[in-house]
Image (cartoon, coloured by chain):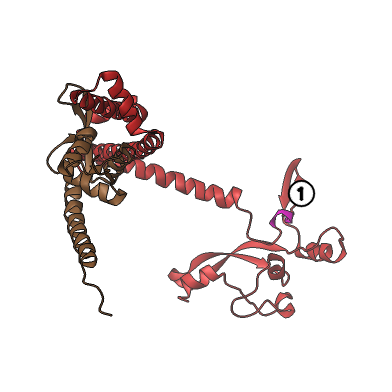
């Protein structure tokens, strides 16, 4: 039995979405699939969080939405990264990397000398 | 901010349906998941059931998306309104600048119209609308006496003595002050100017609720015929003619 998928936290989900649309316009399903595949299916994207997050980012103007035609010829809402979103992606990536390094440093710290 | 092409605002004429958009987006997602499961070898029926089980209850998410969509819709509408206003103003100014003569005449017409209306209103306001600037102005009356000359009605002022009598004897008159409009000459020779004046008695200031800013009221001595002359200037006259 494979290890259970890990749920993505809300703040982290915003960052992953920005990264996913940085490659070009994508609809919600494609964004979810790209993140899942990029994370080797370890991360699980909850639809209940994904779509509100997409709409939140669109409202903030970090991503822009436009209706277009999907690869299977259906009307779909495509999201693109705005320049404001690109700036956010840079800042958030730097913060996240620092955070992750810090957590690792703590977890791998040698035992406190008695 | 990405610029929305101008023609896009006509789509909004019928109103984009935020609810429909959110539902369509979510349905698309569900269908894509089903396809994904089918591609992995699941029969369609079972795939759909599995997807629905996986998604769980999307109502809260749907409601949040609709709420956010409405916020965006409102902002877009406001932005459109401002864009339109800006375009209209720019167009108006450009058309006016193209016909300077016409613009000048239009401006002059408007200016004269406003000026005339303001003047008429100011006169009507002081004469008809605003009460005279005395305490209890609505209880003040001007008294004349009327008489007949050659069958014609005429009226004239009341003698100062009669006013004093009224003041002393009447119980229905609270206060009375005689005044007689007059003219005075200021200066001598060719420089003399005619100024409006009025003859009053010592009771006038109290009647009008006034007190001198500088100086004093008339004395009883100044009121007796042949007594010393005295004047009180209005503040306005004092300021304009005596450089105060």
**Residue B221, percent from left and from top:** 73, 80
Q: Main secondary structure of the magenta part?
A: helix
**Chain letter for the red colouring in the rendering:** B
Say if the magenta span includes residue B140: yes
Residue B23 percent across, percent down from the top left: 33, 27
Q: What residue sits 22% from the left and 38% below the top?
A: A32
Which of these two is toward me, B226 or A104? A104
Question: What residue span does the magenta drawing correspond to?
Answer: B137-141
Q: Is residue B190 left or right of residue B210?
A: left
Q: Pinpoint the chain carrying mark 1.
A: B
Per the image, label 1 sits on a secondary structure element best described as strand
* Image: B71 above or below B244: above
Write down the quadrant of residue B201 in the picture. Answer: bottom right
Q: Is residue B228 visible?
A: yes
Number of other residues with Cα within 10 Å of mark 1, as a class: few under 14, some 14 to 19, many 20 or more: few
**Image point 82% across, 64% down: which residue?**
B167
> Which residue, given by chain and number where applicable, does mark 1 sit on?
B146
Position in image of residue A80 (x %, y %)? 18, 39
User: Residue B188 versus residue B208: which sits nearer the camera?
Assistant: B208
Chain brown in the figure, letter: A
- Of the pair B27 and A112, the residue shown nearer to us: A112
Locate the N terminus of chain B by quadrant.
top left
Q: Residue furthest left?
A: A23
Coordinates of residue A70 in the picture (x, y in percent): 17, 26
Instruction: From the viewer's perspective, tell me whether residue B92 is left or right of residue B184.
Output: left
Residue B65 lies in the magenta stretch: no
């Amino acid at each position: 039995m494979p290890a259970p998928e890990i749920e993505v936290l809300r703040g982290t989900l915003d960052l992953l979405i920005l990264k996913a649309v940085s490659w070009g316009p994508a609809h919600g399903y494609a964004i979810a699939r790209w993140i899942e595949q990029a994370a080797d299916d370890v991360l699980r994207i909850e639809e209940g969080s994904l779509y509100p997050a997409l709409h939140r980012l669109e409202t903030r103007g970090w991503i822009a939405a436009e209706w277009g035609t999907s690869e299977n010829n259906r009307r779909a809402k495509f999201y693109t990264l705005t320049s404001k979103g690109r700036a956010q992606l840079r800042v958030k990536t730097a913060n996240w990397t620092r955070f992750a390094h810090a957590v690792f440093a703590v977890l791998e710290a040698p035992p406190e000398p008695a | 901010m990405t610029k929305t092409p101008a023609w896009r605002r006509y789509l909004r004429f019928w109103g984009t349906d935020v609810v429909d958009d959110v539902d369509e987006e979510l349905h698309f997602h569900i269908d894509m998941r089903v396809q994904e499961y089918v591609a992995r070898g699941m029969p369609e029926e079972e795939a759909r059931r599995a997807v629905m089980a996986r998604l769980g209850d999307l109502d809260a998410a749907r409601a949040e998306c609709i709420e956010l969509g409405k916020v965006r819709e409102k902002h877009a509408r406001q932005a459109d309104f401002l864009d339109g206003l800006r375009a209209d103003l720019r167009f108006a100014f450009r058309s006016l600048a193209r016909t300077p003569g016409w613009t000048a005449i239009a401006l002059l017409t408007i200016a004269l119209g406003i000026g005339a209306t303001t003047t008429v209103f100011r006169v009507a306001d002081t004469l008809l609308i605003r009460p005279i600037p005395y305490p209890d102005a609505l209880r003040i009356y001007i008294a004349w006496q009327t008489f007949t000359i050659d069958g014609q009605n005429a009226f004239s002022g009341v003698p100062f003595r009669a006013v004093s009598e009224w003041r002393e004897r009447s119980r229905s008159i609270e206060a009375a002050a005689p005044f007689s409009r007059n003219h005075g000459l200021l200066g001598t020779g060719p420089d003399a100017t005619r100024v409006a004046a009025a003859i009053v008695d010592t009771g006038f200031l109290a009647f009008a609720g006034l007190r001198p800013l500088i100086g004093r009221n008339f004395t009883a001595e100044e009121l007796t015929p042949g007594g010393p002359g005295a004047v009180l200037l209005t503040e306005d006259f004092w300021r304009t003619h005596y450089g105060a």
